[in-house]
Image (tube, grey):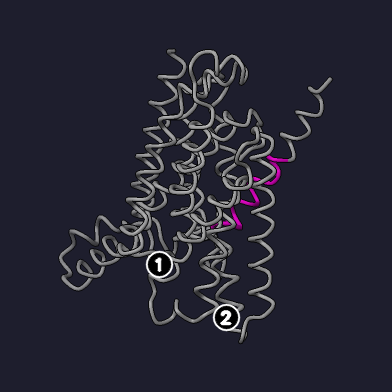
Amino acid sequence: MKSRSALVLWLSVAVLLLTVLSLMAGRTGLSMPMELFGADVEARELARLILTELRLPRTLLGLLVGASLGLCGAVLQGLTRNPLAEPGLLGVSSGAALGAVIAIYSGIGVTLPLAVPIAGLVGALIASLLTLALGAGGGLLVLVLAGAAVSALMVTGTALALNLAPNPYAVWEISQWLLGSLTDRSWQQLLLALPFMSLGIALLAGCGSGLNALSLGELTAASLGVDLRRLRWQALAGTALAVGAGTAVTGAIGFIGLLAPHLVRAPAGHEPSRVLLPSALMGAALLLAADIATRLLPFAQELKLGVLTGFVGAPFFVMLVLRMKRESP
């Protein structure tokens, strides 16, 4: 208990510090406080605009998306009892990506900027409904296989849009969006995603007691009064709303949902409900740290967030697979 409490405390402090650093970090340097309260009126106004219109929505969106990914990863790993489960497992992220790509491909995203996140959110919801329809009546394995099938279908649709893109600019815009980023995200996009993400986080957070019972086996959980069908619906609906809305605004950001639960499970305890809050905090911290790194790394062009998380997450994924291979009988 003390170990988990200390972990939550330290992670909360880390998230707070990273939030402050995210508000300060950028290509213009780290002197934002001096510029905000300096004597130069023009510099002060420019600093205020950068802080309130660029960095603040970017930071808040990073907190929300990171927490959603970490929490969703913990719930799905508990639901499927698979340590390799992550938010893309059920096709939600791929559906959001396809919806956004269709908006960019059709040109609606140029005339109506909010069309891209709205289409992404619709794509995520359609993908989740397809997964539920295909997996209805089966067990967890059937649900996972349904998610894999839907994900493959959505990825194929995205590849088709890239293949048939009408001009090089459309290909470039689609590929840039697919790499994932928090750059230039506005208050409009944040406020569009906020209600869906908040509802999704609430649904995922409410899965704790059901996941605890499920860790003893499906028959035992059912005997304890857990409605397994309702638990699956709740987990998938929460994933669709939280991760789907986040992906619709930021693009695809991988590995945060896989990494966060594994990094906190040892000190938090292996009981699924004890891992949920630390995973959300760790997800927020990881995403903020990665986003800060994209701004400070010495590249001529800002590195995309999805690329950086992939570089960090892929080796961890390989290590995890090798460890499971060693521990298997």
Q: Which of the 4 image quadrants contains residue 188?
A: bottom left
Front disc: 2 or 1? 2
User: Which region is colored magenta?
Assistant: 305-317
- Residue depicted at 24% across the width and 57% down the height: 34
* The furthest residue to the front: 137
* The furthest residue to the bottom: 167
Q: Residues within 10 Å of mark 2 (few under 14, many from 20)?
A: some
Q: Position of residue 112 (x, y in %)?
A: 38, 77
Q: Which residue is mark 1?
A: 184
Amino acid carrying label 2: it is Ala
Amino acid carrying label 1: it is Asp
- Residue depicted at 53% across the width and 51% down the height: 129
323 or 274, which is in the foreground? 274
**Eyeballing the image, is 233 above or below 156?**
above
Secondary structure at numbered mark 1: loop
Q: Which of the 4 image quadrants contains residue 214?
A: top right
Per the picture, the main secondary structure of the magenta-coloured stretch is helix
Q: Is residue 308 magenta?
A: yes
Q: Disc number at residue 107?
A: none
Q: Which residue is mark 2?
A: 170
Q: Position of residue 169 (x, y in %)?
A: 57, 83
**Eyeballing the image, is 280 above or below 288?**
above
